[in-house]
Amino acid sequence: MHRFYPNAYHPMKLTTRLLFPLALLAGLPGPTSAEEMLVLPEQVFPQLKQVMDSAVTQSPRMILRNLDKMIAEGDLTQARAGLLPTVSGSYQMSKARDDREDQVETLETDKVYYNLMLSQPVFHWNERRNNARIGQLRRQIADRQYVEAYRTLLLEIRSAYMQMILKKIQLLNFRNEQRLSDEALALAEEKLAQKVTSEGEIFQVRIANERAHLATEYAEVELLQLKQTFSALTGQPLPSDEAIPEEIYGLPASTDPVQRMLAGFLDRGEASVPQLQIMQQQIAVEDLTLQNQRKRLLPKFNLVAGINQDEQSYTANVGLKYGVRSRYVGLQANWNIFDGFAARGATASALARKRQLEAGYKQLTEAMAQDAQRAAKHVELAFRQMQINDRMLASAREFLKYRQGDFQRGLASETDVAAAEAGVRSMFASTVSSRYTYLMRIAEFVSLVGADPAMANLDRPKA
């Protein structure tokens, strides 16, 4: 039964293939010992790294975000179009009946009119340039939102993968308990058939067996749900039960690199935080919008040039044919003098949105530093808890060996050995859970401070 719980790897026995130098996480020189390294889930499980790399193109969430980038690119093209000249034209041909004062009879007439005009914005109080800049900022926001979506997706993929491991371990434990319960029930039924026991005594055994089966079925359903979630996140088929590991190995760990990375993050500030960069650009958008709204009621000037023709002819008297062909060039002014205070309301709204974003930016800046410090503390606490559980698991396994030796010497019963085995199973599950917590705290920390090496799968947007 001990084979269900592989021995935890000693820190110095892990191959270096499972470890990444801190240099990959924070751009610092690589440490010289295993204790100076941080370990991420994809380094413990190389198959997870492959999934994370392919999620850039296969995850439904990233596909949607990529469409957002395409939309922003189209909006930028439209915004820039306001700086370029526009060419418009119209053509009209119609038949009419004219009642003229100088003619007795009604005349049938053919009318032809066309106009071709070029218009170039000349002076719009920087409104067109501001619109183009807004389009550019919104495209950059979409780029950074794409990066931010991938950052959060990586955390969810890591968590979902390791939750499948935890649930598989739990399912194996439930199946083992179910097997033992089936054996106990078969023995009780045999005793009942031999009239050694009563219906009342076997009732509790039957209930325990039903509960064991129910717990197993619940675990199977929950594992299936986790696999479906993982598939939806990654855009890949459901993983098989065999592809899910049955243990999170013992991890060499030290919290010293975390403190150095935290200090570097606090020095860099918003330069490494996509959320703050997005808010900076949103503030810039609202500032440009505010400038435009304040100029809404000022006159705008365009350079115009074109050609038009107005012609009509009468079928009854070709001598009455009339036509004018005109070519023109000039300066056109458009002035919206009064709009029912719409400009005033738009200006007030733009100003309020800008102030709202500025206040949110200030709060987020302060929260980021606090969140980073809190995340670093969580890493330390998870590390300490993991060390305690590792020691307790080692103790439980030593106690199991002791009980097995006593059993061989006739000093302990099968019940004593079974109780020791149950203790190992319980402690093993708790230890793996603490390793999961530690790995996720590391992943959350490096993600928060902008040092997640998996983000190298993306091309970072230019400022």
Image (tube, grey):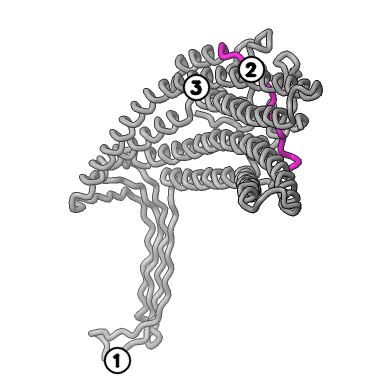
Look at 36% across and 29% down and name the residue there.
361
* Residue tagged 2: 391
Secondary structure under tag 3 reads helix
Q: Nearer the viewer, mark 1 or mark 3?
A: 3
**Label 1 amino acid?**
Glu
- Dot placed on the residue nearer the N-terminal end, 2 or 1: 1
307 horizontally vs 212: left or right: left
Look at 65% across and 38% down and name the residue there.
170
**Label 3 amino acid?**
His
Secondary structure under tag 1 reads loop
Q: CA distance from mark 3 to mark 2?
A: 20 Å
* Residue tagged 1: 105
Q: CA distance from mark 2 to mark 1?
A: 114 Å
Secondary structure under tag 2 reads helix
**Label 2 amino acid?**
Arg
Look at 34% across and 31% down and name the residue there.
360
